Amino acid sequence: MATEITQSVKSNTSHHQTPRSETCCGRIGNLYRKIIIQFVDWMKKWSFMCAAALGTLLIEPGPALRSGLSFPLTWKKQFVYHTLNPKKITLEQAQKRPILMIHGNYDRQTAYLPLAKKLKTADVGPIYTISLPSGAITKTDYQLLSEKIAEIKAQYSEHGVDDPKIDLIGHSRGGHLAQSITWAEELADGDRYYRRERAQDIGKVITLGSVLDQEEIDRYRKIDPNFDDQTFEIVGKYDILVTAPSLVKTGIAVDTGHLGILHSDTAHRQIIEWLKA
C-alpha cells in the first residue's frame, strides 16, 4: 500500500496531499476502532447488551442513529413501505421467488428499509418481512416464521404455484434463524423442528453479520448436498459483535460494522446479484 502511494505521488504531484491525507485518516480511524473494541471487550464483562449497544453507536453512529429514527415506523399495523408484505401478488410476481427478510436482535422490520428500496427496482420477487421478539431464540420464533411461510405459500397457491422456494435474508439473530430453519435438526427449547416439511420451502439463505463455524458447515453439508449452492454470507470488517470471518464458499466482507451492513451499497449490490443468479 505504501509503495502504491509513493508511486502515485511521484507520477503526479497534484495528488500529493490526497494520498497522505487518506493514509493519515485511515490510521486515525483504525486506532479509534481498536480503542473502541478494547473498551467493548472490557464492558462485556459487566453487560454484553450495554457493550454491544454502546460499541455499535461509537463505531457506526450514522447507521445506529438512522435505525433509532426509523424505529417508530414499526408501530404501524401494516408494514408496507417500498411494496413490502403485499396482501396479494400478481401472476407475474408468482413466477419469481419470494424473499423473506428476518431482522436481528432488539431490532425491527425497519432495519431492511434501505435494502427494500433497492430491491423494489431490482426486478426480483415479492418481498416480505416479519416482526419477531428479542432475546434468546425460542419456539415462538419458529412458530411465527412458520405462519409467515404459510401466508406466503397461500398467496402463491392462488396462482397455481404450490411449492415456491423462499429466499431468506437474515441479519445477526435473524441470520441464525434463517440457517436453523433450513438445516438444523435440534432447535430452541429442545424441540425438533419439522425440518422435512420446511427445508423444501427454502431457496437461498443470505446472512448479514452472522457466520457459521467450520463444524456447523461440515454438519450442514452432510444434511443438504446443495448447502454450498444456497448459502451466502456478508460480514463487516469492523463488526465488534461478529468478529469471525466467513468460512462458506460464497462469503464476502464489506467496509462496515454490524449495523452498517444493512446500509452498505456494496452489500445491497451483492445481495441483488445473488438473488438474481
Image (cartoon, helix red, strand yellow):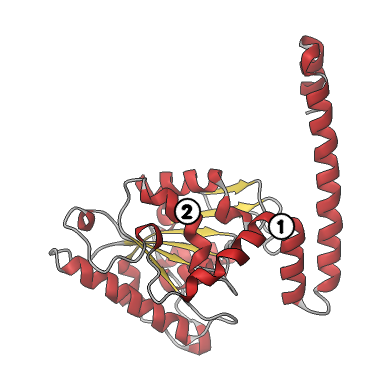
Q: Residue at x 42, y 44 (%)?
A: 273
Q: Quadrant of residue 160?
A: bottom left
Q: Residue at x 17, y 68 (%)?
A: 157
Q: Residue at x 50, y 54 (%)?
A: 114
Element under disc 1: helix
Coordinates of residue 197 in the picture (x, y in percent):
30, 76
Whether residue 246 is visible, yes or no, is no
> For mark 1, does the 10 Å Cα neighbourhood hold few (<14), some (14 to 19), or many (20 or more) residues?
some
Q: Quadrant of the C terminus?
A: top left
Q: Amino acid at mark 2?
A: Leu
173 vs 84: above or below: below
Residue placed furthest toward the top? 11
Per the image, the residue denoted by label 2 is: 115
Coordinates of residue 20 in the picture (x, y in percent):
84, 27
Per the rendering, the mark at residue 61 is 1
187 vs 228: above or below: below
